[in-house]
């Protein structure tokens, strides 16, 4: 095995190890029960995933309409560039997020059972 | 610049723009939008191996700006640049320092494009939530990187560049 092959094998092995680690972590995830909305790392809202909610999240950067229904959350509409947050698949598992980069907003499912507000 | 090189670069840029257009139509199969498959990276890898890093970077920057204005928006341009720069540095490192073959360089480019975008998203959002999607993105980057590298290798072997 020459030097190039070694480097290439190491590179691919590293990627695979990282991925397997994450995949194993995924097995420990379960359906969450709290939806946390954050902007720039600061919590704005916290909802229960079991409720039926339609919330217009207004910030100085724009709005995102969050819908929670049937135990899953998604963004119905937003006035951001690209509309990526609207196209995210609905989330329900702990750790899953919907992000709106132009609005700096993250909507994450967490496992904690202290749903308030 | 010789007209031969100029013609080839122009053709590659046009091809890369078509790839960018196709990508803008495809939603990521996992429901993670904004993350591209990295098809346009074929052009960057080819130019990097056929010419040099400077040419490859210039052409890639042109591709991102033109594609951004045609099929995306200003925000998409900055997001694309974040992935492209990390991916590009990694590919130059693979080619120049490690002297790796085109297929491996392309895999590294594909994976680190997505890594760069996730890191950029983390910085912007001041949150690590996007790391949840990193493994899926790394695997998809690896697959497209491999296919693109293979295609590049075939093009080189046939003497098309
Ligand atoms: Zn958005």
Image (tube, rainbow, N blue to C red):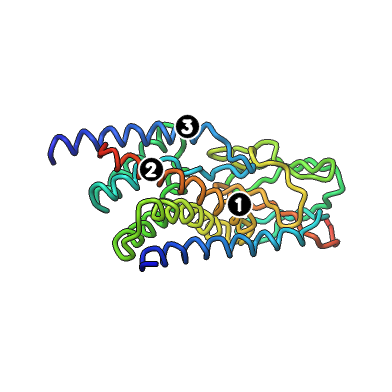
* Quadrant location, the C terminus of chain B: top left
Position of residue A77 relative to residue B54, above or below, is above
Q: Secondary structure at mark 1?
A: helix
Image coordinates of residue A20 in percent, x first then y, are 63, 61
Disc 1 marks which residue?
B136
Image coordinates of residue A29 in percent, x first then y, are 76, 59
Determine if residue A33 is in view: yes
Q: Are marks 3 and 1 in one subunit?
A: yes
Q: Few, some or many C-alpha atoms within 10 Å of disc 1 (few <14, some 14-19, many ≥20)?
A: some
Identify the chain of the residue marked 3, using the numbered disc in the image: B
Identify the chain of the residue marked 1, using the numbered disc in the image: B
Disc 2 marks which residue?
B42
Position of residue A20 relative to residue A67, above or below, is below
Image coordinates of residue B137 in percent, x first then y, are 56, 51
Dot 2 or dot 1: first in sequence order is: 2
Ligand 1 shown in quarter: top right
Indicate which label's residue lies in the foreground, 3 or 2: 2
Residue B89, quarter of the rendered image: bottom left
Write the residue at 35% across / 45% down. B153
Q: Nearer the viewer, residue A112 or B22?
A: B22
Dot 3 or dot 1: first in sequence order is: 3
Disc 2 from disc 1: Cα separation: 21 Å
Q: Secondary structure at mark 3?
A: helix
Tell me whether circle 3 and circle 2 mark residues in contact (CB < 8 Å).
no
Position of residue B114 relative to residue B2, above or below, is below
Disc 3 from disc 1: Cα separation: 21 Å
Position of residue A116 relative to residue B23, above or below, is below
Disc 3 from disc 2: Cα separation: 14 Å
Disc 3 marks which residue?
B22
Determine if residue A45 is in view: no
Q: Nearer the viewer, residue B103 or A21?
A: B103
Write the residue at 78% across / 40% down. A54
């Amino acid at each position: 095995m020459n030097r190039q092959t070694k480097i290439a094998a190491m590179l691919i092995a590293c990627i695979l190890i990282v991925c397997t680690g994450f995949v194993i972590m995924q097995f420990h995830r379960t359906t969450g029960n709290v939806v946390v909305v954050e902007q720039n790392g600061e919590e704005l809202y916290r909802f229960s995933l079991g409720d039926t909610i339609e919330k217009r999240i207004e910030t100085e950067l724009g709005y995102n309409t969050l819908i929670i229904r049937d135990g899953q959350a998604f963004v119905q509409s937003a006035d951001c560039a690209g509309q990526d947050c609207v196209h995210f698949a609905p989330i329900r598992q702990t750790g899953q997020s919907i992000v709106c980069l132009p609005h700096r907003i993250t909507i994450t499912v967490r496992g904690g059972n202290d749903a308030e507000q | 610049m010789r007209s031969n090189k100029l013609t080839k670069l122009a053709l590659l840029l046009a091809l890369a723009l078509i790839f960018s257009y196709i990508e803008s139509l495809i939603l990521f199969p996992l429901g993670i939008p904004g993350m591209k498959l990295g098809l346009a990276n074929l052009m960057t890898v080819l130019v990097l191996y056929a010419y040099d890093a400077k040419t490859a970077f210039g052409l890639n920057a042109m591709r991102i700006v033109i594609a951004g204005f045609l099929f995306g928006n200003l925000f998409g341009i900055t997001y694309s640049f974040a992935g492209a720069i990390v991916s590009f540095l990694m590919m130059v490192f693979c080619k120049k320092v490690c002297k790796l073959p085109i297929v491996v360089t392309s895999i590294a480019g594909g994976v680190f494009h997505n890594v760069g975008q996730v890191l950029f998203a983390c910085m912007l959002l001041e949150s690590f939530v996007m790391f949840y999607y990193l493994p899926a993105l790394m695997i998809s980057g690896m697959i497209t990187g491999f296919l693109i590298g293979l295609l590049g290798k075939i093009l080189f072997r046939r003497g098309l560049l």
